[in-house]
Structures are given as structure tokens and as C-alpha cells.
Image (cartoon, grey):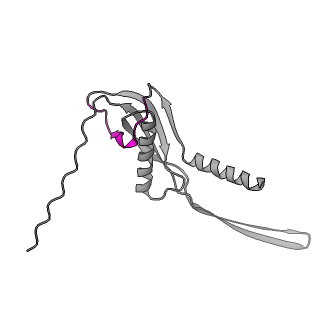
Amino acid sequence: MRRFAIPGLLAAIVLLAACSTSHVLTGTPRPPIDPAQVRLYYGPPAGGFEEIARLEVQSGAFTYGEQNKTESVLRKLREQAARLGANGILFQGTADGHGGGGVSVGGGGGRVGGSSFSGVGVGVNISPQQKYANGIAIWVPNPPPVEAAPEAPATPATP
């Protein structure tokens, strides 16, 4: 039974490392809030704010598609900010990681004594390039109201 415990533990460590987020406290955290209450700001909000922490997140190790990667890092920024009690994130930007998938081919051969040998190997890496995002977790004392989505136009009555 112990033979199966070590590979399971290693798999858990790899999964945790793939979902890394980090923060550096620069202010005073507040009680946690719902991530849905965290607003994203692309510039300093009117009325001022209090900085709580610097955040850095990355998309999952197996997140495919540019839109999915962007949604993943924005969701993780909101979750991390909410855990610190921030009701806003001053978005700093995203960056693409290095690496990503690829195919490697290798071959070799030789002669030992009267016998020769050869070998070929192929390796495939299917993990995509990760996306990173940075932001500043902030507390906005009087956040502006969320604009309501425009109403859908009424469908004309069919005669």
C-alpha cells in the first residue's frame, strides 16, 4: 500500500505548484468577502483607495485557449483579493510565460565489439504556455455603483 502513497503525494504537490498564487501584504487585510464583490479597476478609482497587497497569479498548468487563460487569472486575482478583504483590484497587466508544448526527437547509435546498436526516441510536451497576471488588492471606501446591463430590445410582435 505504501507504494501507491508516494506517487499520489507527488501528484498532489505538482497540482498545488501548478495553481500558485502569491501576495505581499503592503497594508492591513480586512475580513474576507465574496469574490463576486471584488471590482476590477484599470486606473485608480475616484475618491481614493487603501492598498492592501500586491498580487501575482498564474493560469493553471493545463488551461488551454487564450480566453480561458485570461478568465482564469482574473478569477484567481478576485479570489485572492477577496480572501484579504479587498473590494477592488488595481489591475497591473498580464504576461505570457515561457515554454509550452513541443515535440522532441532524438536518436543515437554505436558499435560495441562486433555488434552495433541504434535507438530513436520521441517526446511530446502537451502543457500549454501559462499566463501570469499582477494586480494591487485595494479597499475602496465608496465604490461607484455597478452599471446595470442595458435591457434587451423588445421583440416586435408578429402579426
Compared with residue 16, is residue 139 higher up or lower down, i.e. above or below? Answer: above
Image side of residue 7 versus residue 24, left or right: right
Identify which residue is drawn at 88% across, 73% down: 115
Identify which residue is drawn at 22% across, 46% down: 148
The quarter in which the C terminus is drawn is: bottom left
In depth, the one of 46 and 107 nearer the eye is 46
Query: Is residue 54 a member of the stretch shown in magenta?
Result: no
Which region of the structure is painted magenta? 30-46
Compared with residue 41, is residue 119 higher up or lower down, i.e. above or below? Answer: below
Q: Quadrant of residue 89?
A: top left
Please state the horizontal and vertical placement of residue 68, each as a whole percent of the image: 43, 55
Question: Dominant secondary structure of the magenta stretch?
Answer: loop
Image side of residue 153 versus residue 130, left or right: left
The quarter in which the N terminus is drawn is: bottom right
Q: Quadrant of residue 65?
A: bottom left
Query: Is residue 40 a member of the stretch shown in magenta?
Result: yes
